[in-house]
Amino acid sequence: MTANNQPKIPNAANPIILGSQYYRPPTPSAENWEHDLERMKAAGLNTVQLWAVWGWIEPEEGKFVYDDYDRLVDLADQNGLKIVISTITDLQPFWLPRLYPHTGMRDEFGQPVRGTPREECLPGLTPGQCTDHPEIRERSMRFMRELAAHYRGAPALTAWDCWNETRWSVGCERWICYCDESIRAFRAFLKQRYQTLDVLGKAWGRRLTHWEDVLPARSRSYLNPSLLDWLRFIIQRAHEMGCWRRDAIRAGDPDHPIAAHAGGPLTNNRDQSEEAPFARGNDFDTGPELDAFGTSAFPAWFGFDNTSLGIWLEVTRSVSHPKPFWQSELQGAAFNQGFRYGIAVSGALQQYWTWMSFSRGAKAVLYWSWRDETWGVESGGYGIDGQDGLAEDRIAALRETRRLLDAHGNELAEYRPDAATVGLVYDTDNALLAVVNRERNSNAATLGINGCMQALERQRLPFDLLDGRRLVIPDEVKLLLLPAAYCLKPDATDAIQAFLQRGGWVYAEGGTGCFQTNGFFEERPEQRALLGNLGIGALRRRGNHIDAMCVVADCAWPDSPALRLNGALWSIALDPPKTARVLARDAMDDAMLIECPVGKGRLILSGTFPAYAYGEKAYDGFEQLIQSLTTASGAAPAWRIESETDLTGLATRTGRSGSKRLLFLLNTGSAKTVIIHPDEAPAGPVHEWVTGETLHPESGGGYRLTLPDPSHRVLEWKTMA
């Protein structure tokens, strides 16, 4: 970190990282290195990423072998390429269980867990020995310190990635770790959280007399308070793990930025698979601890549209704030999993993904990977310069992006997306409540969150994901969305009520505040968070959510259309206070959507879960609701875009770079011509980066632009101010 506590620019002469993963030992083989790095440079890349695998570099305790990495770092420097080193500490050396047999992991049934080489990288063991044992944690940190010290002075080094996809339990067949050291750490966590056995016993619904009797419940113990706290402990443990990884590298190299990245957004569905839910930790905790935080994204592999990719990027930006965020792994070419090969990735589509990342504020894009993989289940896939038939097309598109970065890299480095006026509250406790229920996944909490984000993205409405555990609502936010806020903490409730008092609008759903943090149902509606404070009652709860469908008449808010809202999960017949306005009733004539004035603001409350229903299957009514609330609350963007054709598939973002305004337009729908009406009058011509065009205002106002499919365009202008 620099003296003013801001992350250093990795390379001031070339501030945006555009690179690719290259080496995951022992491939690619050494005879390819010189040619490949020359070709990477010629393609327009400026950075190479290397996987530094602990099990490969330290083949016997205390002996570190860097010869292959030394040569690659030198070759990168000779070709004018920078290096990002990703420390793969979770692939542990084969000697570790032999020398430290007492440190092995145990599953939830107390059975030993034997590490094994990973399916895509074989020179080490995972999940390995337990880092709750001081000996294993110290040896992990020693590897990272030694590695960092060794490359600290390398001219090519630009940054570290200290944790790949924030995973540590890959390859386990049951939840881990339940060894004696982990149980001791769990009890220490509980002592800090509850202070005394009496308080813990009350929270868990037990009579406890000794700490030795305190054990975590197994994964099938539905809605068990001890299971909820075990998962919270796993989240805290992952946060601590991220910190000691960072500290170990910082001890060896105090000079270079340290990043990490997750395998996808925090808001993805969680289930009871081999890895415990949120074993990766909470990104709201991890991101701010580092100089940058990122995500992996494989859009063609996962079947993304522009909406899904936008969500992944916005969530990553939100959890990284105020630090920069990276697109740390972006699909390089056709994917491969075993004998299942994906479709080829064109250069235009790949650069659409790249510029989508830049539009959301990413300061680095690293592709996975340069060559097709040659090891394990990923063999034959992912290489930019691979054999899916479109390598030259992708490289030509990369060169075009290099041209743009050479011309506008400084503007992109300074670019900040406009502050969001819509906030979306997400508390991992709600996902935990859902995942330990009988459904054994987090859909009851995360489908509504993702439904809201999909509706916002499809309407090109920027949003911030906000941490519900420590809720801070930015001053710019005018509309707050609370889907599936089953557990709403007192501080969050206070923040929301203060937001309403000063004029904010809040959309909430029927389950708001109906659970306590220990998983107990809040029996009395008047004691439920937020709704009880505002005098909103519940007459009855029904499981037949089909009857909960309701229709809101037109002009419920100025110029809003008539809209239908679908029900999901269950419905609550709302008992509104006298000051409230009933906007819609269901088939049983129960109030199912109400508006309550609170101070200068408005609370819009549904008695069911329309956002969840939208997350299951998109429908017009919910999008219309979000659009109506955005307009009525004043959260709608001041700039406008119009077209005679459908705007489906068009993503946009606006922001500022110094004295300039930037507008990104990214199209994966059919080719279209649009007219853009800026929010601030340009103080001169409007320039488009990709085509070099200068746009002039139409006679009726606005600027006309044609967008091929797929394509990206960037408009730049100076403002009057």
Image (tube, helix red, strand yellow):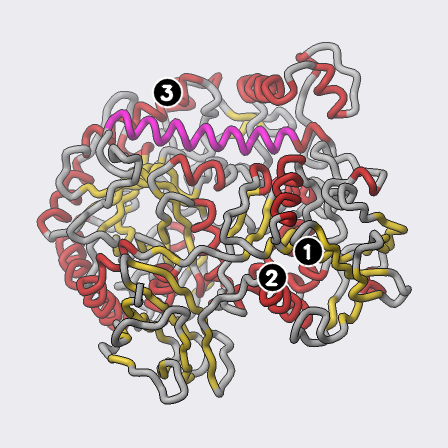
Q: Quadrant of the C terminus?
A: bottom left
Q: Mark 3 or 1 closer to N-term?
A: 3
Magenta part of the chain:
229-252
Provide residue 501's location: percent of width, then percent of height.
65, 48
Residue 602 tag number: 1
Q: Which residue is mark 2?
A: 633
Q: Residue at x 68, y 50 (%)?
A: 599
Provide residue 368's location: percent of width, then percent of height.
34, 55
Tag 3, which secondary structure?
Answer: helix
Find out whether the residues at labels 2 and 1 contact each other: C-beta distance under 8 Å: yes
Q: Which residue is mark 3?
A: 138
**Front label number (3 vs 2):** 2
Q: Residue at x 63, y 68 (%)?
A: 628
Provide residue 24's location: percent of width, then percent of height.
30, 45
Query: Along the horizontal axis of the image, is 228 left or right of 520?
Result: left
Three-letter amino acid code of the residue under disc 1? Arg
Q: Residues within 10 Å of mark 2 (few under 14, many from 20)?
A: many
**Which image quadrant for residue 57?**
top left
